[in-house]
Amino acid sequence: MYFSVRSDRSRSGPPFPGGLKIAGRGLFMGEEFLLPLGTNTIARIDTRSGETLETVDVNETVGNLFTYKGNLLTVNETEVAAYYTREALDRSIDRTDPDAPQSLNLKSLLALADDNTLNAIILLEQALERDPDNTETQYLMAEALVEGLEEDFPQFRELAIKYEEIVHDRTLKDKLVQLLALGDISAQAYRSAFERLMELVENQSAEAFSPTQFGAESIQVDEKLSIDADTWIASTLATAYDRCPPEQQVELAAMVVQRGSKIRDRAVAYRRRQLAYLRFLPPAHPFILELADDLYQLREYTAAEQMLQTVLTSGSRENRDTALKLLSEVPVPELQRLSVFGGGALGQFSPRDLPEQVSAAPRIGEIDWNDGMVELSVSDGQTYRAVGKLPLRSERWGREPVSIALQDRVVAIYNGLGESIARISYPTTVPEDNQHSVDQAWVRGGLLFIETTAEVVVFDMIRAFQNRPDALLWRQPLSGVTATTQAKLIKVVADTRLGFANAQRVASFNIAVGPLTSVGVPVQSGSTLVMKDVLTGKNLWTRTGYRGELQMVCRGDELAVIETATSQQAIEVLSIRDGTVIRRNLKEAIPVATWFVCDEWIVDIDEIQATDSSSEIMERPFGLRIWSPFDESIEMKLNLEPGSRCQHENFRYIAAVEPSGRLHTIDLKRFGEPEDRSPTATAAGGEDSGTSNFEGYSVQTIPQQGSALDTIALEAVGDKLLVLGNYRGEGSSVRASAIYQVDGVIGRMIPVHGYVFAIDKNSLQLAWPQPVEAYNMTFPQMQPRTSNMFALYRGFGEKTVAALVRASDGRIACQHTFEPQHRSFAMTVSPLQQRITIDAGGRRLGFQVSNQPTPPEPVAHISP
């Protein structure tokens, strides 16, 4: 270790470079002052002018500075570090034997202090000729080689290869291999880079593994990109493998298979660590599948699911099918809570006592409901519930669906029957005057990711089903992703021309949360974009230099980052593995507002200029634009009449209703699939919309005479999509405070005042011959969606009305009117008993669904 002192006094700068704070007591040395700053910086300051002459970054954490025998010491709370000074080095050189190894070592340190790395290596070569086993010389040679490779890789590459074998220090050895591999990649020597990194991984022992095992927590690839060291190893192995010619890939694949076979019988923790470096290599995927199966056996379900994500995105078809089969297997704790028997019924069983009929039971949505008469029973008392469902993106691989609610610092998870099956304590981390509201949530298998105004937080639902206290995996305030972005966040809500309110964060810096990818979730805070590991919250890679707020979508192993600044729009396509730029394009920005994203698709609102400026119509026509930044082509553009209303269902389906009665429906998950359309349907891609290749339809419905649309909602019930209209006539509207918030009790209740249409999810065509007409009603958003019926509810006014409507054909199955004791709503379904229970207004309404088409008639009638 050394501290260089230079005579260059021409430099100028701030007293404390980089805004660093004083880390300890400084030290006077003549007319200069040495000052410890930040974590690992020492500044040399001229005491006469106050000018900062030089700053040096050291590997150790700095503290108070002292001198001892001419050397510099820094003392912090946990360690003492000593550094050479030029004066001490010069005095230590043996003048009687200047060519002795010790003297040559000291001269090399002076050469390094003068930034003369080549001369330092020449001196060390001379020292090694005299004493090849001198450990100090070997260490100094390793330091000099690392510094030389960082300065000028081509100049020092051969020297580094020549002396690589004498480097025994683990940190320097790993750093040397990193630099050689980076240079090999730059020189397109991909096989050499792959072999070096494989050797590095294979030489690690189980005890040697640590977050900083490869010499540093992160690697600074360029001025904008730094990568976590472990992530860099995995991504660089994959890059080298992908760029090798096919004949070399066969040989490299054999190396991977050999390594996987060698560790197959090792402990699960060791295999998990080793295979993390090989996870992007297709030859390693069979071993990852074996490891995931073992993790399932150890009941580490969510960790196994996350490990399988890379197999799904970059594996062979055979391995993907095997991964999907594993992911579709229901973990025992989930089976206990989400089966058709109900969460309460199975919670009493331990996994080994779980009845066989439970695992063989049909899924909730697979049970056919009766289609006959509904018998109603009414009693006092009810299960109190006052929650609103979160907007949810869900990937469950065929497993039972869940619904998520957040209220009173508790995350509540509901099964398909409408039962609350798990509750996770969720204490706030923001001040009371900055309470966050929920934006959206993702569910992927057993993983639950929630984005709020102020933070992101990740839960393990499988642990929650087991009532484990470690269900909360990690959380990250969005105002503190980086150290320079500490600020208060607020949320503002504004009406949109689509007929719904849109909420946005307001802060003094840019904030954005990207999609849940196979490796993690990207989060922007200020000018920095960070990919967070979804299980641990660890920073996998970091990119800096962004000026505007980002939009992000993902396709496979690529992340598209769209940055709009003034009149220019930059589209960067990054590798989700390590954040490197795959391609970049700069073009003129289009004045549109983004509505939401789904997979690789961005849905924008495109306002169309009105042709008649004197028109009294308050709303101009607008359109929806759906496009992918990966090929920058517009997949669809749908022009709509003034006064049209739109809504989406969990970021997948879109419904748009025009005042003329035309209804458009789009399924974003089926974009680009082969067309399979009924010849009787009118494609939305026809002349009305100008669309190209997408899955959607337009049909003519009945317009509401004398009324105008205020809002619509799009909700899924079974295999149907319900378009819930809220019309206003003669200047009145059902949108009132009594519906949107009743003393904070009801939660989210969707207003219904007018027509309700049903769309078949598969064909996207109208499912009912006529719409349902419902007035002054609401659709409780938290109701379960797995039966053949849905509820409409009026919880305001003097009379409470609860009605069940058949989703199959729109017929009213049963309706009950009563005087409410208080305002509330909860609903559960039991397909095995063919029973639906609604708790509303202080009453418990039991609906028994039978196969009997009409009430029973007497066999005979006898009268006097």
Image (cartoon, rainbow, N blue to C red):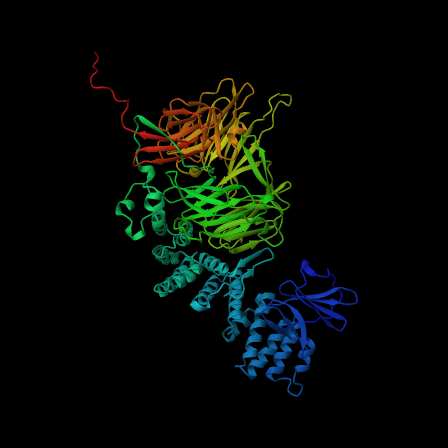
Q: Toward the viewer: 356 or 703?
A: 356
Q: Outermost residue toward the top?
A: 864
Instruction: Please report the residue visible at 70 percent of the width from the left and 61 percent of the height from the top.
Output: 16
Q: Is residue 178 above or below residue 363?
A: below
Q: In this view, does 117 lie above or below 772?
A: below
Q: Toward the viewer: 71 or 458?
A: 458
Instruction: Please report the residue visible at 36 percent of the width from the left and 45 percent of the height from the top.
Output: 337
Residue 280, percent from left and from top: 43, 56
Residue 163 horizontal side relative to residue 117, left or right: left
Residue 147 horizontal side relative to residue 809, left or right: right
| Residue 114 appears in the figure | no
Q: In this view, does 155 lie above or below 691?
A: below
Residue 5, percent from left and from top: 70, 71
| Residue 245 appears in the figure | yes
Quadrant occupied by the C terminus: top left
Q: Outermost residue toward the right?
A: 48
Q: Toward the viewer: 97 or 700?
A: 700
